[in-house]
Image (spheres, rainbow, N blue to C red):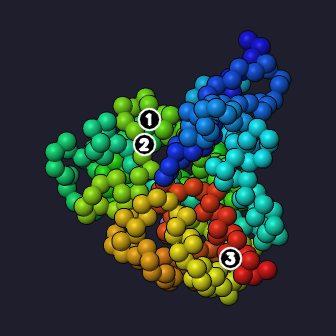
Amino acid sequence: MSVYKAEYIWMDGTKPSPLMRSKTKIIPLGEEPGIWGFDGSSTNQAPGKASDCVLKPVCIVPDPIRGGDDKLVLCEVYLTDMTPHPTNTRAPLREVAEKYASFDSWFGLEQEYTLMKFDGTPLGFPTNGYPAPQGPYYCGVGGSQIFGRDLVEAHLEACLEAGLKIAGINAEVMPGQWEFQVGPCGPLEVSDHLILARWLLCRIAEHYDCDATFDPKPARGDWNGAGCHTNFSTNEMRESYDAIIAACEALSKDPMKHVKAYGHGIEDRLTGHHETQKWDTFSYGVSDRGASVRIPWQVKIDGKGYIEDRRPNANCDPYLVTRLIVDTVCSDRA
Ligand code: ADP
Ligand code: MN
Ligand code: MN
Ligand code: MN
């Protein structure tokens, strides 16, 4: 065949949390995926009378679902006058990343998620009532601790085949709850790869009779929420402990600016319990999983490395989160 399939993927305008959308274009072999369009009135991105929105490819990887010559094509959304659409949060990140390029910022994102049955309960929960309390599930093994491993393995394999910078996976503290890590790499790349990895997860879940949700509090009660811990370093922080502390201090200046942009429903997750600091309080500390920002113990010993912002929700927009962190930490040092 002399054509290939390109799956164009973009973030829509759904509030309070955008959804991922995609559609397929057949392209002659040898041609690059070009500018395309979609009906913005069906994605909360345009009124019906002026519905055209523009898709601009920004990150193209092999499609591990279809295989062969087929591609996944992550896009930014533009208006027809070719200015970034208001829902396009990647465009402003590009500017900030460029401004502070000399800091060589790296991010490692820990994406937690929950596999849900169609009745709305997490995989591993009985339809009525609750499973045994938290304890054995995190990094567990065995049929009564672990739910959804085949899906999780298929997702890991797909991410690797797509060439995404996936760093690892682990089972989380609630049944049906898992995590994958992306990075470390720059803010644009880590965010693009996170969105593609999220899309692959939801796409592969279609084959397993369940949904992957990034809901930050998928089960009420005594269960951990789902976050997207954001590990961060600059070239300075990878060399000096003073720069580690300076980054924590910079983040302490206007914490609400960050909390407000770290994902809808953050107050329900950052309760001060379940390995979180309370949403309206800022703290940092070595090894402290009850702090807003944790300095890993190895970083304290080495006197250099990175910090972990524990606040971002699983449903956060990585373009917003990485932009705020680069801007806050680097503008303080510039
Ligand atoms: P946790 O102990 O919090 O569960 P993880 O191992 O899940 O930690 O995630 C740590 C993340 O930190 C990984 O994704 C890793 O790539 C990232 N990381 C490691 N070193 C750096 C660094 N210098 N800058 C930014 N991120 C880093
Ligand atoms: Mn982790
Ligand atoms: Mn985790
Ligand atoms: Mn973590």
Say which element carries label 2. strand
Residue 247 is drawn in which quadrant? bottom right
> Disc 1, disc 2: CB below 8 Å?
yes
Q: Which residue is mark 2?
A: 212
- CB of mark 2 near ligand 3 (< 8 Å): no
Residue 248's image quarter? bottom right
Q: What's the residue type where badge 2 is placed?
A: Ala
Which of these two is toward me, 102 or 261?
261
Does the residue tagged 1 have its C-beta within 8 Å of any atom of ligand 3?
no
* Left or right placement of residue 286 versus residue 22 in this view: left
Disc marking residue 329: 3
The answer for how far apart the CA atoms under marks 2 and 3 are is 33 Å
Instruction: Please tell me how many numbered marks the rendered image carries.
Output: 3
Q: Is residue 243 visible?
A: yes
Mark 2–mark 3 contact, CB under 8 Å? Answer: no
Vertical arrangement, residue 20 with respect to residue 49, above or below = below
Give the answer, above or below, for where 147 lies relative to 137.
Answer: above
Mark 1 packing: few (<14 Cα in 10 Å), some, or many (20+)? many
Q: Is residue 323 left or right of residue 174?
A: right
Closer to the chain start, of discs 2 and 3, is 2
Q: Amino acid at mark 1?
A: Ala
Judged left or right of residue 231, residue 1 is: right
Sequence-wise first label, 1 or 2: 1
Where residue 51 appears, x then y in whole percent? 65, 33
| Residue that extends furthest to the left in the rendered view of this protein | 128
Q: Which residue is mark 1?
A: 205
Q: Closer to the camera, 56 or 158?
A: 56
